[in-house]
Amino acid sequence: MVEQSNIVVRVARFEDTHYAVRITDEMESSAKARGTGIAKRSPEYVASKMLEGKAVIALTTTGQWVGFCYIEEWSHGKFVANSGLIVSPEFRKSGVAKQIKRKIFDLSREKYPEAKIFGLTTGLAVMKINSELGYEPVTYSELTDDEDFWAGCKSCVNYDILMSKGRKNCMCTAMLYDPADHYEPKETTAYFEKKSKVYERLMRLKQIIFRTREKDNNGGGGSSPKPKSKNAIFH
């Protein structure tokens, strides 16, 4: 575990844009390692978020990149998403992800005080952090209906699942913080801890389904029997 004393978490600026390629490369490789899909973002897009003051970056005091996250605005500012949370492999399990999420959450509340803050994640660790901030699991119908947001999912390998379910479910878990109507963080944290084993089993099953789909798509299914319905879990 890496010590946090030499890590600075702050709002990203112009001079941080050269990290954009490193960030997007790590986003893609991390998604593959987890066995999940991802809505791809280009280095130019990530850099634009830095220039807009809508991103948080973590660096060591010597300038080594540690982590990143950014804000996206939807439905004319009624919804915002804290997206693309990524931490460099050598700094994972150091607690820096929680610091980044707290910083981007506070930045979102500052810039969009009345907006609902939401996220889609396939990671149990991110769900835990979100719960500690006051997010709660919700159905997809409670998220933005902004077509530009859902269009961003087209680059994800699981887009066919999303569309086959009428955008009501997919591999990701939806979480939401509503500033006008929300539980206290201690309540959402307690609920997550109570249900964490259920979430863990569900995410493991989703990963199995993803890998089966990927194997079939690559023609590597062999003679192994296929599941009766790969989408059966997504009702």
Image (tube, helix red, strand yellow):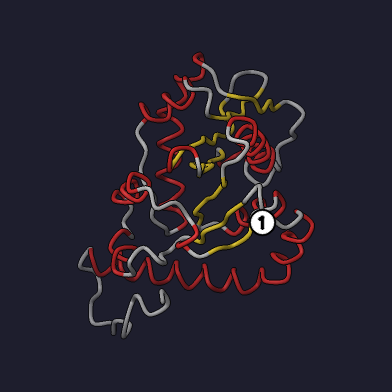
**Point 52% across, 59% down: residue:** 174
**Point 42% across, 77% down: residue:** 233
Residue indicated by mark 1: 128
Query: Height in image: 122 above or below 92?
Result: below
Residue most extreme to the top = 15
User: Is residue 88 rendered to the left or right of residue 6?
Assistant: left
Query: Height in image: 69 above or below 48?
Result: below
Q: Total number of numbered labels?
A: 1
Q: Amino acid at mark 1?
A: Lys
Q: Position of residue 47 (x, y in %)?
A: 42, 24
177 or 186, nearer to the observer: 177
Residue 199: name its quadrant. bottom right
Q: Position of residue 175 (x, y in %)?
A: 56, 57
Q: Position of residue 197 (x, y in %)?
A: 65, 72
Query: Height in image: 205 above or below 106?
Result: below
Residue 18: name its quadrant. top left
Residue most extreme to the right = 186
User: Is residue 102 rendered to the left or right of residue 219?
Assistant: right
Q: Position of residue 42 (x, y in %)?
A: 34, 33
Q: Quadrant of the C terminus?
A: bottom left
Q: Quadrant of the N terminus?
A: top right
Task: Look at the numbered disc 1 and give the secondary structure of its residue.
Answer: helix
**Point 46% across, 62% down: residue:** 140
Query: Height in image: 66 above or below 16?
Result: below
Q: Residues within 10 Å of mark 1 (few under 14, many from 20)?
A: some
